[in-house]
Every structure is written in C-alpha cells, then in structure tokens.
Amino acid sequence: MEGRGLRAGFTIDAPPPLHMSEPLRRTAFNRLFAVVYFSAILALLYRHVRNLFLHPTTSFLSFSITLSLFISDLVLAFMWASAQAFRMTPIRRKEFPQNLKRIIKDKDFVGLDVFICTADPYKEPPMNVVNTTLSLMAYDYPTEKISLYVSDDGGSVLTLFAFMEAAKFARHWLPFCRESNIMERSPHVYFCSNYQHPSSPHFDKIKMMYEDMKVKVEHVIDKDEVTDEYITDHQQRQAFNKWTKSFTRMDHPTVIQIMNHEQIILDKSHDIDISGRLMPNLIYVSREKSKTSPHHFKAGALNVLLRVSAVMTNAPIILTQDCDMYSNDPQTPLRMLCYLSDPALKSSLAFIQFPQRFHGINKDDIYDNEYKLPFEINPMGLDGLKGPNYVGSGCFFRRRALFGDPSTPVAPEIPELSPEHVVNKPIRSQETLSLAYHVASCNYENETKWGSKTGFRYGSLVEDFYTSYRLHCEGWKSLFCNPERAAFLGNVPITLFDGVNQCKRWCIGLFEVAFSKYSPLTFGSQYMGLLMSLGYSHYAFCSFWC
C-alpha cells in the first residue's frame, strides 16, 4: 500500500493522506491459472508440430488443414499470452480530495488548460459540445486557473456562434451551480434528470435561459447560417466576417476567438460572471488548413491547441476531452491533484487517465458499447506496471511530458512554447494574438520535431494509443484513476454503421503501430520491459479478433 501519509511509521503530525493503492486480492490465483493454462497451450502446440513434421501426411488438403489449425492456435495463444500482462500486477487506487485543502491553498492550485475537439457540427451537434464545455467550466476549482480551448477542425461558423451564446449563458450557469451545489453540471443532463429540482424563480429563470439558447443555436443550424437577427454587436460581426466565400472546411485561414460576454480591458485576462467572480477563459480555435499541407487529423489539432495555449496561458496541466464526454463529477481536478501533489510521483508522471464510461446503454447492449475491458479492467493491470495507455479523452497530462523524456527535455523552436515559460502578457494583447496565429498556421511544423519527439505523435489513426506508447518508451509513467462516481460520461454509437466505422478506424490505426518500426514486440520490449510490451502488443494486434 502506498500514498502520501500512508507510509509506515508516520506520526499524528504527518500530513493527511491524499491517495493510496492496493493490489487486487486474486492476483495470486491469476498467476497460478496462467501457469496451468500456459502448460496446456504448450501441449497443444507440441501436438500440432508433431502432426506436421513427425507424422506428415501425403495429402495436400490434409496438410493445409493441419497447418491452418496450427497457425490459428498460434495466433490465439499469442493473444491469450499478451492479455496476461493485465492480470499479473493489477492494483486499485483511491484518492482523498477532502484532505487536499489541508495541504494546498486554492491560490497554489496549478493552472489547468482544457482541450476539447470537435470536427463536424452535423455529426457532433454544437449543443452537445456546448454542454460538455459548460460542465467543464463549472469544476470545483479556482475559475481563474482554468482555460478552455475548443478546436473546431470543421471550421464552422455555426460552432463559433454556439460558443458565443454559451459564453453568455455561462455567466449565469456557473453561479447557479455553486449556489445549488449540484453534481450534474451539464445543463442538458441536469434539466433532464429525474431528480426533484427546486421550485424557485432562480431555477425557472436559468432553465428558460438554457432553452432560449438551445432554440437559438438549433435555429441557426437549421438555417445553416448566422443571420443578422442573431448578431448583437460589432465584435460578433467582425468574427463572422472571417467566413468568406473562399472559406472551406479543408482550406481556410486560422480563426482564434476569445469568448467574453463583454469587451474587457487588456490588463484583465478573465471575464466575470453575474456574481462578480472571475470566469474561466473560453477560446475558440480553428487552425489554418490547406489542401497542400497534411493536417494529421486529431493529433494535429491537439498539437495546435498545445502551442496556442502555451502562448496564451501555458498551464502545467492539460485535460484532453472528447466533445461528447461531459463532466459527471465537479471534483475530478481535485482527484488529479491528489497525485500530482505527491513529490514521489511527480518527477516521472506523464498523465492520469480516467475511464471512459457511457450513459444511455440499454441492458442488452447488442453492440458491446460499454467497453469495460479496455477502459476499466485492463488499465488496472497496466497501472501495476508503468501505467495505463491514453484513451483519447478524460486524461490529465503534464505539459512537460510532451516535450522529451523525464531527464532530457526537448527545447521547442521558440521559448514561448516551453513548458517553463511564464506568460506575462494578457491573452487579448496584439503580441499574444499574433504569435498564437503564427503557431496555428498549417506550415508551422515543417522541419520541426512536432509529432515525432514533441507533442502528440503522428503516424497512426489512433493517436492516443500511439502517443502514450511512445511516452512509456521514453521512461514516463501514468496512473489510472477510477472513482466510484464516473468522472466523465459520454455517448456511444447508436447504429451498426457508426459502430463498424469506429471499429474500422481503431483496427487500421492499431495495425499501423503493430507493423511499424516502433512495434511493441520489438521496439517496445527494449524500453518498457516484457509485461508492458505484451500489454501494448495485445492492443496493437487485437484486430486479429475482428
């Protein structure tokens, strides 16, 4: 058992524990079962070899069948053996966020930059993205420490309009969440929940405001344009004028828009809500795209956010979030801090992964959308080794981990992108905005280390899996945090077509890693050890099951 304050010999004056871990009780039985089962597999393979070489048949058909069965059993044996990496040292962790403020004051909490990615306003409705964003803005965390960056890879004026409306609504929603102390901080989830809501003018007013915003956004989406009736000031009109006739999804300039209900003076970095408290920054980013430059899909979008956020806020911690995964627990950042505040973990800790959980799954779950094995069970096994892999959402990164290995940092091209850089200019200053536009350009990464040694890694459609794999090879570690109340809840594919498309993308991306020069079987085993490389190999080759 480990954790700050849970070491042997601690006294009553020792700081209270922030976290603990313990091995699962049935680990010894898993190991015994693996030995017995492995012996049976060896006997089966021996029988195949004996039939093939010691008692060869003269019939080509008979030989082909025997050889096919041998190859099939060999593949299945490998998949079983690689899965045992998850069963050898599984651990369970627990955090004590209630002790955090006895050790750290609010003003000493680290800054948090949140990255939210969306790409298509028709496949990913802006109101869903807005609800996710509002739930993250309402964290139980010092609001002046939070900045949210929304990457719109579809370059849609509809998404920008939705976030302008969301920024206005957030000025009322955040105080309401604090005063009512609600747990469901996604407005849609809160208003649709079965809980008995308080009957008060304040509740009725905030619900009416949300419904008005929803109607307005959906009306704009139905019209497929932002008409003059919805443009309320010169700042909005100026932003929407960037969408010219030559502006297309795959060919357009950079758009960066800082969302504030009111124009604020340059020596202030945050807007304020109706109660007078500072609000989190909300920044819309649509990176420059050109048909002549590769954009590297989601990994490229995340790297643009990594650079733009470095110029504007440069928080030490980054949360990456899918646009359809809303926050279900406002104390999630405090759970993250329970680990990052431990000096014994901090030096080599790259990221903390929370499981992906889903709502709206019926009891039959005919498409197996719950994904408990890769998102909840297997990560506990890897957590006893070097840590779980990154699954694309619900993950808190240390910014430093994306710039080289623990002992040898990789210096970026300009000092403003360094994790150690201290931002001392307002985000609305012309100098800051000019640099942000520069690092978001489509040609910025040419002849740089972005995507290879810096940032999120290119080379696979499953950029999340590949990035964590390379980080673990560099010597970084990760943790799996699985609280009783789900930290995040998201949507799942509801049609067979969507489910097959998702599975196809995963299979192709994993095979890209499996058969590359960085294959976990060869490259990974040299840098991570046998069990970790087997765990990554199980995922990389799991497409054989399909």
Image: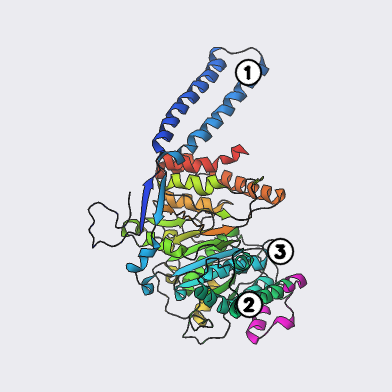
The image shows residue 320 at horizontal and vertical percentages of 52, 61
Residue at numbered disc 1: 63
Q: Mark 1 Cα within 10 Å, few/some/many (few <14, many 20+)?
A: some
Question: Camera-side residue: 377 or 317?
Answer: 377
Q: Mark 3 Cα within 10 Å, few/some/many (few <14, many 20+)?
A: few
Note whether 300 is above or below 28 in the view shown: below
Disc 1 to disc 2, how far (Cα)? 76 Å
Residue at numbered disc 3: 122
Compare marks 3 and 1 and give the one earlier in the sequence. 1
Mark 1 or 2: in front is 2
The residue lying furthest to the right in this view is: 223
Residue 525 drawn in magenta? no
Compare marks 1 and 2 and give the one earlier in the sequence. 1
In this orientation, does residue 146 appear? Answer: yes
Residue 222 drawn in magenta? yes
Question: Camera-side residue: 314 or 367?
Answer: 367
The image shows residue 136 at horizontal and vertical percentages of 53, 68
Question: What residue is at 25 percent from the left and 51 percent from the top?
Answer: 8
Q: Is residue 142 left or right of residue 48?
A: left
Numbered tag placed on residue 204 in the rendering: 2
Disc 3 to disc 1, how far (Cα)? 54 Å
The image shows residue 194 at horizontal and vertical percentages of 62, 63
Q: Is residue 103 left or right of residue 306?
A: left
Residue stretch rendered in magenta on the structure: 219-241
* Majority secondary structure in the magenta region: helix
All told, the count of numbered labels is 3
Question: What residue is at 61 percent from the left and 80 percent from the top?
Answer: 201
Disc 2 to disc 3, how far (Cα)? 30 Å
